[in-house]
Amino acid sequence: MLVLEKEDMKSLKGEKVKIFTGNANPQLARDIAAYLEVPLGKAMVGKFTNNEIAVKIEENVRGTDVFVIQPTCHPVNDHLMELLIMMDALSRSSANTITAVVPYYGYAKQEKKTSGREPITAKLVANLMTVASADRLIVVDLHAPAIQGFFDIPVDNLYSLPVMVNHFVKRGLTGSNLVVVSPDAGGVARARTFAEKLQASLAIIFKRRPRPDVSEVTEVVGDVSGKVAVIVDDMISTGGTLVNAANALLARGATKVWAAATHGILAGDAINIIGNSAIEEVVVTDTIPIPAFAREGKFVVLSVASLLGEAIRRNYFHMSVSKLFT
Ligand code: R5P
């Protein structure tokens, strides 16, 4: 929970601001609207018989600052198109500004060419969003922070880290008996900050991907023997990275393994694979809806609704959002 100072408490009630959502994560949108004490805007977002996305904004938005909440999670293409078409409709309805609030940015892993004749789909998505009239983007834990530079509009890349750290502190998982582990070289900066906040040591796993969606641990750097390990990642897709990392840590003497990842994509059989693993608990956020049966198992879901709500409120009032990064 964010701790706010009195002068920060300006309310959005009665302001010229509206919040809309597509079908990607209506519960998160409702939670953000509840945090901000504003009703969700009325819109029909469905499909024509021919499967094309159908959108109708059902209230006046002329001159209004509009925020559209829509993670581009599974089914990614439908949710992306819903967002683009909603922004097009809002722009043609004379909204004053349009902010795309995309808690999970799909296609972020395709942010560079790793071999010849590949696309850079994360950049294509950025182009599509701006062509569809986005004036600003709010995201959480972009897979590659450099994706911010794919946009020529302001991007607020929020971190779930404070919400996550708070959870581990409450569980008493801090101190020198704890080691925070990055499951790949790309996640070292995130894991280092996590380790600092939990006063833990740091270890790094090196992995390789022999083919898409398959990962293998090649090396573990850092002392994990006799320690409780927390693997920190930005997303869990197939669960392969996480489970392989946990097995490698236990084989090197870690006593227990926890995990934290912002985006629970949980593709394919990930929930069962993780459920059957030796991992004690997996902490994710609600940037993407997490199925009820996962919540009954090893998954703990923390909400980023107040974090996103604050980012919306602060943007509307032209207040600094820096506070949200600490
Ligand atoms: C990779 O760079 C990411 O940070 C995650 O480690 C990866 O996307 C997880 O994918 P999976 O669960 O399919 O191994």
Image (tube, rainbow, N blue to C red):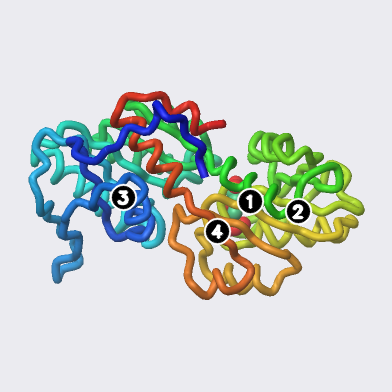
Disc number for residue 167? 1
User: Whole-Å distance between the Cαs marked 4 and 2?
Assistant: 16 Å
Crowding at mark 1 (Cα within 10 Å: few <14, some 14-19, many 20+): some
Comparing marks 3 and 2, which lies closer to the viewer?
3
**Label at residue 44:** none
- In whole angstroms, how far apart are the C-alphas of marks 1 and 4? 22 Å
User: Which circle, 1 or 4, is nearer the viewer?
Assistant: 1
Of mark 4 and mark 2, the one earlier in the sequence is 2
Nearer to me, 160 or 91: 160
Is the shortest distance between ligand 1 and the CB of mark 4 under 8 Å? yes
- Is 324 located above or below residue 262 in the figure? above
Estimate the spatial distance between the alpha carbons at disc 3 and disc 1, rounded to whole Å.
Answer: 24 Å
Q: Can residue 212 be seen in this view?
A: no
Q: Name the residue under label 3.
A: 33
Type of amino acid under label 4: Ser
Q: Name the residue under label 4.
A: 237
| Mark 4: secondary structure | loop
Residue situated in front as seen by the camera: 118 or 206: 206
Q: Mark 2 or 1 closer to N-term?
A: 1
Q: Who is closer to the viewer here, 143 or 199?
A: 199
In the rendered view, does 285 fall on the left or right side of 38?
Answer: right
